[in-house]
Amino acid sequence: MSKRPGQSSQKARSSQKVQSGQKVPSGPGGVREVTPELRARTARTFGLVILGFVAGIALMVAVLSAQGRALREYAVRVQAAVLATGPSVNVSYGQKCVDALPGALPSGVLDCDVQVAGGRVSVLMQLERERQFRLPARGAAE
């Protein structure tokens, strides 16, 4: 590959610019100078990504906590409604939560059953994704 008169190679031009104190533009495969502005922008972006990740996790935990609290409160209300009827210690039976406490089930609940055995009332909820929530048995004397 021959060069025309007055034409110099890329390497020769680059070394001339470095020697003369000019900034060398980065090309493909070239070394790029990291300026304080670029470093600050990169750190800020990294910080925002980490902050967004932590905020997303915190939001998911808050939502799941609120849903769990709503389920527990509903189960306690159902249990209190059944206990208010004064179940006999001699009778054992089961019934649906909507029969004991009319109204809609909380979101995420597929089915809800109340079990009365020996005057003690427990509540079992079937949730989405094959999960269960059981409120332990409690009697009228407790």
Image: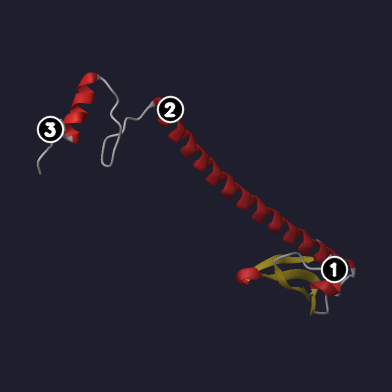
Q: Residues within 10 Å of mark 1 (few under 14, many from 20)?
A: few
**In the structure shown, which secondary structural element does the residue marked by tag 3 occupy?**
loop
Q: Residues within 10 Å of mark 3 (few under 14, many from 20)?
A: few
Q: Earlier in the sequence, mark 3 or mark 1?
A: 3
Residue 31, x across and y down, in percent: 27, 35
Instruction: Give the residue at mark 3.
Output: 5
> Which numbered mark, 3 or 1, is in the foreground of this view?
3
Instruction: Give the residue at mark 2.
Output: 37
| Above or below for 7 versus 134 | above
| Above or below for 76 versus 54 | below
Callout 1 amino acid: Gly
Return the mark for residue 103: 1
Q: CA distance from mark 3 to mark 1?
A: 92 Å
**In the structure shown, which secondary structural element does the residue marked by tag 2 occupy?**
helix
**In the structure shown, which secondary structural element does the residue marked by tag 1 occupy?**
loop
Residue 33, x across and y down, in percent: 32, 30
Q: CA distance from mark 2 to mark 1?
A: 60 Å
Callout 2 amino acid: Glu
Who's the residue at 81% across and 68% down the image? 104
Camera-side residue of 40 and 88? 40
